[in-house]
Amino acid sequence: MRAYKVYAIKNGTVIDHIPQGRAFKVIDVLDLEEEKGIVTCGMNFESKRLGKKDVVKIENKELEPKEVNAITIVAPTATLNIIRNFKVAKKIKVKVPKVIEEIVECNNPNCITRNEKVPTKFYPISGHPLEIKCHYCERTISYEEITLL
Amino acid sequence: MKFQGIISINDLSKKEILYILDVAKKIETGKTKPDLSGKVLSTLFFEPSTRTRFSFESAMNRLGGRVISMAEPKASSLAKGESLHDTVKVIERYADIIVIRHPQEGSARWAADSTKKPVINAGDGANQHPTQTLLDLYTIKKAQGKLNNLKVAMIGDLKYGRTVHSLTSALSLFNCQLFFVSPESLKMPEHILEDLKKKKIKYSEHEDPSKIINKLDILYATRIQKERFPDEAEYEKVKHAYVIDVSLLKNVKKNFRIMHPLPRVSEISTNVDGTPYAFYFEQAGFGIPVRQALLSLLLGKVK
C-alpha cells in the first residue's frame, strides 16, 4: 500500500469524479497544456459513485465556476473543490453552460462550421444525459457523440 | 410584431406564424398594400432552384421593389473561393434584404449572424426551408379554413424529406392528427416521432395509403428519390405503391385536398390534376403572398 495515491495539494483546485478515461479531455477543455504550475492527472481511481474515476489537480490556481462549466460537456459527473491550506475551502457545482462556444466540433460533415471558418456554437437541450444542438445546422448531438475541436 | 430574419421554422411561435399568415392574407386580398419601392432584394442562390427564386423575385417585384441576383452559382465568387461570410459582408452593402439558398446546413444562420440586414433562408442543405413550411400552412388554411384539429397525411420519402419534417413540427402546434405513409426504409425519423409523443400529438404509421385516405383532410405528397434506395430493385418495388391516381380518390371527403411541394415526377398522376382535390399548383401560387408578407415584415413596411 502506498501512503498516497496522489499527493494532497496545499492550494489550488481539485476536479474530482471525472468519468474514467476522460481526464485528458478535461485538461484539453480547460487548456491546461498552457498551465505553468503543477498539474497532476490521475486515472482509474476507485470510486464509490462511479466505480472508476479520474482526478485532475491544479496547484496554486483557483478556477472560476465560469471557466469550469465547460467541463460538463466531457465530464458531466465532475465535482470541483477549491483547496486552501490543504482544506476544502469551497465546493463548486459545475453546470452545463447556456451556450457552448468554440469547444465542440459539429459531427455533421455538411454543417457550415465544417466547411468554413465559423466559431462553433451549441445549446444544451437536455442535461441527463447531455444532449446539445448546433446553433447552425440544428443537428442534435448526444453526449457519447461529442467530439472536441 | 418584429422579425429579425426567417431562418428556421423552429424560431417561430404559433402566434408569430399566425401573424405572418394573416399579413399574407391581407396582401393577397388587397387589404394591405405594402410599398417596397426603393428597396433592393438580393437572391443569393448557391444551388439551382427555379421555383423558390422566381417566387421571391416575383413577390418583390409585385411590391415595387427591385431584385439583384447572380447568374449561376458556378459563376459566383464562391467558385473563386470567397467565404460565405465575406460574400454576405459585401452583398449587405448592395441590398436591403438577402434571400439565401446554400447546399450546406447552417449556412443561412451563419449568413444572418454575419450581417445586420434581414436574411431569409430559402433552403440550407437538408436542414430548413421555412418559407416552404409557411406557404404549406397558408395553403392548408386556404383549403380548410383552419389549421386546428385537421387530419393530415404525409406520403413518400419521410426519412430524408426536409419539407415533411418541418411541416410535422409546425402542424404539431395546431393539434392536427398526423398519418405517415411510407415504405419501411423511408419512415419518419425516430427523433421526430419522439417529439410528437412528448407533445401528445396523435399520429400513426402506414404503408398503404388506400387504408386511410377516406379519413383525410389533407394528403401531402413528396417525391421518392431513386438515389435514396440501396438498390434499384428495392426502388422498383415501392415506387408504384405511392402513385396517387384518381382510382384512389373514389370515396375521399369532399374537403379533401392533395398538396405537393413540386416538382413532381410520378407521385401524382396527371389525371388527378382536373379533380377538385388537386391543390398543388394553387399551393405553388401561395408562395407569392407568403413571401410578400415576409419581405414586407422584415423591411418594416408592415407593422
Image: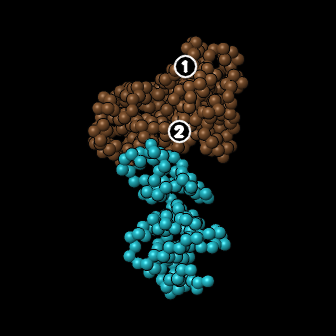
The residue at 49%/55% (across/down) is: A147
Vertical comparison of B191 with A19: above or below = above
The residue at 41%/48% (across/down) is: A113
Q: Residues within 10 Å of mark 2 (few under 14, many from 20)?
A: some
Q: Chain of mark 1?
A: B
Q: Residues within 10 Å of mark 1 (few under 14, many from 20)?
A: some
Q: Is residue A146 visible?
A: yes
Left or right of B177 in this view: A38: left
Vertical comparison of A39 with B224: above or below = below
Left or right of B105 in this view: B84: left
- Residue A122 in percent (x, y) is at 48, 54
User: Which chain is the one coloured brown?
Assistant: B
- Residue B45 in percent (x, y) is at 37, 33
Residue beneath disc 2 = B17
Q: Chain of mark 2?
A: B
Q: Hey, which quadrant is residue B238 in on the image? A: top right
Rendered image: mark on residue B241: none
Residue type for callout 1: Ser
Chain A rendered in what hue?
A: cyan
Depth order, front residue of B295/A127 = A127
Q: Nearer the viewer, mark 1 or mark 2?
A: 1
Residue beneath disc 1 = B266
- Residue A97 in percent (x, y) is at 51, 61
